[in-house]
Amino acid sequence: MLTVAIGWHMYQLTGNVMDLGWVGLVEFLPRVLFMLHTGHVADRYDRRKVAALCQACQGLIAFALVLGSTSGEVTREMIFVLAFLLGSTRAFEMPATQALLPSLVPAALFPAAIAASSSAIQTATIVAPALGGFLYAFGSIWVYAPTTALYVLACALMLSLPKNQAKLNQERPSIHSLLAGIRFIRSRPDIFGAISLDLFAVLLGGATALLPVFAKDILLTGPWGLGMLRSAPAVGALLMAFWIARFPIKRKVGRVMFIAVGVFGVATIAFGLSTSFWFSLLVLAILGAADMISMVIRGAFVQLETPDAMRGRVSAVNGLFIGASNQLGEFESGLTAHWLGTVNAVVLGGVGTLLITGTWYKLFPTLAQRETLSAPETKEP
């Protein structure tokens, strides 16, 4: 809700589409700048308190927008500063919350816990933008004030969690300790293979940036159709998350993950070739469902195979890969569409995803043949 409101508020102030792109870039920048530090903080300090502090800071950002909206003093520069602060707090929050989850549930229930968490995220992805847009119609303060209250609630809930995590990393900050997450990922072929597979698959197969073009020029629909196209992957992902939470994937997880990424590529090709609005919705939903299968398997075994004292730093690197693949994927889609045409760009991206899937299947045989999510105890390198 806050992200949507900030974007609309900026466009309302300046009327410049480019400013929307700058807001997104400013929010993403802290994830790159502070990647090494965010993971170290999550491994060195109580993760509940780190996450709660980040949520409290986001509540203060929302409250600053409440005050600014009330006085009419929200400016373009103020939004950029707050967007950077918002991105910074989220950069520190993500590794802490991801690393916290394995200490709250038994390993056997962890895949179902990830699916349940993903269900909540996908629900918010579908509902929150619409709710934020509806409330913004009454004025920006009607979005910022409830958001402030929700952050306060999130902070209180985070602090109410039991403190049952393992002994945290006591190593002093240094280049060696800050780079430990990268070294750990490189030393574990399964983890490196899974993270890099997702990076390149999403980088090549992402077609969401081109949805406005498909909606207007190919599928011949209006803004309502664009909204449905944007929601379709999240709907498919949500339904799959519910299914996985009820029926967790327990066997042949490596093969299932590769098949899911392959389905993602095929669905991308089908969407690029489609001229039917309803068929496009269907394949986008399948695309989202396949992506959810891959995400749950990857997230579960990466966390389970990572020692608790390393989870924050590994999550920070993983989060940067995910963010980079989404951001760069949109840029790649736009660039190839400019060179080759919209349909050719999407189809080529889907073919590229299939080629990457086949190549990674050969390069990482232990990942492809991985039977279960659980792994033997590992030691920090």
Image (cartoon, grey):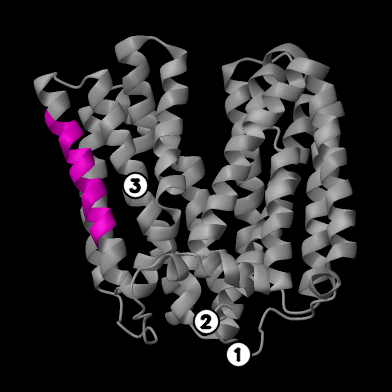
Residue drawn at x 45%, y 32% as measured from the top left? 25
N-terminal of the two: label 3 or label 2? 3
| Magenta segment main secondary structure | helix
Q: CA distance from mark 3 to mark 2?
A: 25 Å
Q: Amino acid at mark 3?
A: Ser
Residue marked by disc 3: 88
Mark 2, residues whose alpha carbon is within 10 Å: few (<14), some, or many (≥20)? some
Residue marked by disc 1: 377
Mark 1, residues whose alpha carbon is within 10 Å: few (<14), some, or many (≥20)? few
In the picture as drawn, the residue positioned furthest to the bottom comes out as 377
Looking at the figure, which quarter contains the N terminus?
Answer: top left
Circles 1 and 3, Cβ within 8 Å, touching? The answer is no
Is 139 located above or below residue 178 in the figure? above
In the structure shown, which secondary structural element does the residue marked by tag 3 occupy? helix
- Name the quadrant containing residue 248: bottom right
Horizontal and vertical percent position of residue 312: 45, 68
Q: Amino acid at mark 1?
A: Glu
Res. 305 in view = yes
Q: CA distance from mark 2 to mark 1?
A: 8 Å
N-terminal of the two: label 1 or label 3? 3
In the structure shown, which secondary structural element does the residue marked by tag 2 occupy? loop
Residue marked by disc 2: 307
Q: Amino acid at mark 2?
A: Pro
The boundaries of the magenta stretch are 53-67
- In the image: residue 184, left or right of residue 137: right
In the structure shown, which secondary structural element does the residue marked by tag 1 occupy? loop
Looking at the figure, which quarter contains the C terminus?
Answer: bottom right
Circles 2 and 1, Cβ within 8 Å, touching? The answer is yes
